[in-house]
Image (spheres, rainbow, N blue to C red):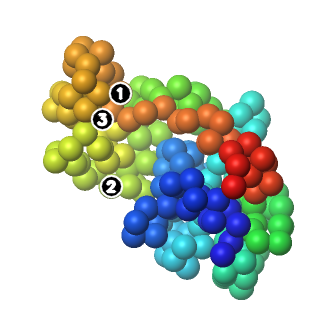
Amino acid sequence: MQERLEWLESNGYITNDGSISHTKTTRFLMPLIGISEYSIEHIKHKMLINAHIKDKEEKLICVILNKLDFPEESKDYVLIQDLNEHFVDCIEEDQEYILIYRIPEHFHEDYELILKGKYSQTSVAYKEVLLRVHGVQTHTESHLGTVHDVLYPTDIKRKQYADFLNVEIALIDEVCSRPRLPYELFQTIEQLKEAYGN
């Protein structure tokens, strides 16, 4: 098994159905560089491992592809990244490709807001990009929200979130937790094992 996936599984980041619990970077920042978890999964299911922040100050994110299990598909994907204006570099490891991208300057303020967990305060342009990728569905059965719910939290969703956290609704501005650093920050497989064990 690919070592990063093995680490994710042993640390509870892979669900019972085998899907990866993606980072907030994957869900809320990766679309800003013109790709999404869905566009990669469309090419080859399970080729995407995750996206992480590569450098917080430089506003670089990296997308990790499973080279071990999908050598041809991941190599083909890497080859077309020169067409992406936000692509910076590719690091090839034995088991994975680490593709590095720069967040466009016009989204820098949104990037900072996302890192602070201020999803609903992001710009209209940012929200349009995210909704084109994730759609406008809402989820009313529990406190868990869709991307639309997170960007446009309603009083109902705030109440559900407050009930889940067992706090007053007046304390709830956002309905999604902020990105958990340092997990959102890129770490090599060796760094993960050293920092978290396994």
Q: Which mark is residue 100?
A: none
Mark 1 Cα shell of 10 Å, populated few (<14), some (14-19), many (≥20):
many
Please state which amino acid type lies under the numbered disc 1.
Glu
Give the mark, 2 or 1, whose residue is nearer the N terminus: 2
Give the camera-side residue of 82 and 178: 178
Quadrant in which the N terminus appears:
bottom right
- Asked whether, in this view, residue 177 is left or right of residue 168, the answer is right
- Asked whether, in this view, residue 182 is left or right of residue 28, the answer is right
Query: Who's the residue at 53% across and 26% down the image?
Result: 116
Quadrant in which the C terminus appears:
bottom right
Do the residues under discs 3 and 2 have CB atoms within 8 angstroms?
no
Give the mark, 3 or 2, whose residue is nearer the N terminus: 2
Q: Which residue has dot 3 on it?
A: 152
Query: Who's the residue at 51% across and 44% down the image?
Result: 24
Decide if residue 16 is in sight here.
yes
User: Can you give x and y, in whole percent of width and height, for residue 134 in the image?
Assistant: 38, 55
User: Can you give x and y, in whole percent of width and height, for residue 129 in the image?
Assistant: 45, 48
Q: Which residue has dot 2 on it?
A: 135
Give the camera-side residue of 11 and 54: 11
Q: How far is the residue under mark 2 from the one under mark 1?
A: 19 Å
Q: Could you tell me which secondary element the residue under label 2 belongs to?
A: loop
Q: Quadrant of residue 162?
A: top left
Q: Which residue has dot 1 on it?
A: 174
Give the mark, 1 or 3, whose residue is nearer the N terminus: 3
Q: Could you tell me which secondary element the residue under label 1 belongs to?
A: loop
Mark 3 Cα shell of 10 Å, populated few (<14), some (14-19), many (≥20):
some
Please state which amino acid type lies under the numbered disc 3.
Tyr
Image position of 184 with respect to 160: above or below: below
Please state which amino acid type lies under the numbered disc 2.
Gly
Q: How far is the residue under mark 1 from the one under mark 3?
A: 9 Å
Give the camera-side residue of 69 and 72: 69
